[in-house]
């Protein structure tokens, strides 16, 4: 059971001194990772001994054990454990500048580490593939949907998975080395993504993989992987770099595809006009 839930379960039974500490811990769980027990007690207008009693009451040996659990949760991307008092104390101007600086740093360092040759090879395979499947779970589904939305304008036979209510292997069971799977894996990754990539890898199906920089084992199953820095200044990871890498990849597929893609896009636009699906005056 997570640390914060253990406290909530006994909250009504706590004496006032420990309840004050619990209030600070529950409001800003991320502070546990950066403040000592004494500093936390001071923020709660309580005592160090109250912190110790509360920690032991919920089953921990000492404060350091709780800190390790909170830091591990932060590494795993659990949003609630990234909530700190610093977020609320910073001015909007400072927060904006910090956010912009980190976004620029993420983009620059991500693309400095990526291989242009890998983009070219992955785009070539995607252009030539018999069929293309794009897979994403949780947050990854958003990026998968965007990628498929752009790619279907360039080439036919691009399928987004999972389809609501279905298992993905109902579609992928007959995948072959002539196909391409594009997988999106950003935290927090669903376990099924790794298992699906492992199976597809054993079937010699080429996998293009867009992921955050903390992906480890899943990258071993891809032929081309694009690892993106995703550090954020607030609760969640920032995936600006993932979207940028996907955009660059789509552009590379388009450039390689040439005249057939231009003809396809012209046909699509003509059909869109017939159904009046786009408001060109708005």
Image (tube, grey):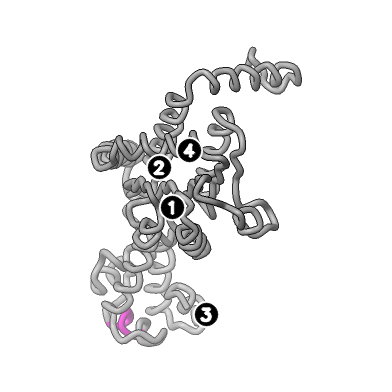
Q: Nearer the viewer, mark 4 or mark 2?
A: 4
Front in this rendered view, residue 156 or 153: 156
Q: Quadrant of the C terminus?
A: top right
Q: Which residue is mark 3?
A: 9
Return the disc, 1 or 4, that comes first in the chain's sequence.
Answer: 4
Cα separation between marks 4 and 2: 18 Å
Q: Is 153 inside the magenta-drawn segment?
A: no
Front in this rendered view, residue 249 or 277: 249
Return the disc, 2 or 3, that comes first in the chain's sequence.
Answer: 3
Return the disc, 3 or 1, that comes first in the chain's sequence.
Answer: 3
Q: Which residues are magenta?
A: 49-53
Residue 272 visible? The answer is yes
Q: Is residue 88 left or right of residue 36?
A: right
Q: Which residue is mark 4?
A: 126
Crowding near the residue tagged with mark 3, few <14, some 14–19, many ≥20 C-alpha atoms within 10 Å: few
Where disc 4 sits, the SS reads helix
Cα separation between marks 1 and 2: 9 Å
Give me the residue at 37% from left, 40% from top: 241
Q: Are marks 1 and 2 in contact (CB under 8 Å)?
A: yes
Q: Which residue is mark 1?
A: 186
Establish if 148 lies above or below 76: above
């Amino acid at each position: 059971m997570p640390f914060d839930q253990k406290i909530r379960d006994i909250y009504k039974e706590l004496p006032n001194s420990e309840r004050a500490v619990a209030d600070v811990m529950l409001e800003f769980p991320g502070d546990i990772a950066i403040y000592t027990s004494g500093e936390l007690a001071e923020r709660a207008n309580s005592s160090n001994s109250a912190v110790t009693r509360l920690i032991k009451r919920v089953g921990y040996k000492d404060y350091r054990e709780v800190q390790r659990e909170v830091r591990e949760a932060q590494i795993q991307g659990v949003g609630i454990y990234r909530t700190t008092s610093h977020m609320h104390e910073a001015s909007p101007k400072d927060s904006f500048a910090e956010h912009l600086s980190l976004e620029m740093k993420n983009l620059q360092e991500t693309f400095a580490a990526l291989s242009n040759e890998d983009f070219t090879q992955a785009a070539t395979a995607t252009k030539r593939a018999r069929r293309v499947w794009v897979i994403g779970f949780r947050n990854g589904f958003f990026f998968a949907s965007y990628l498929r939305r752009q790619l279907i304008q360039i080439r036919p036979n691009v399928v987004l998975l999972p389809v609501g209510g279905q298992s993905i292997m109902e579609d992928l069971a007959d995948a072959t080395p002539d196909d391409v799977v594009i997988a999106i894996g950003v935290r927090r990754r669903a376990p099924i993504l790794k298992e699906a990539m492992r199976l597809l890898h054993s079937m010699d199906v080429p996998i293009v993989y867009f992921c955050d920089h903390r992906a480890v084992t899943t990258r071993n199953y891809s032929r081309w992987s694009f690892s993106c820095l995703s550090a954020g200044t607030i609760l969640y990871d920032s995936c600006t770099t993932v979207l940028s890498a996907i955009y660059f990849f789509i552009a590379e597929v388009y450039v390689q595809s040439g005249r057939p893609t231009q003809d396809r896009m012209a046909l699509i636009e003509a059909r869109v006009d017939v159904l009046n699906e786009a408001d060109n005056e708005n």
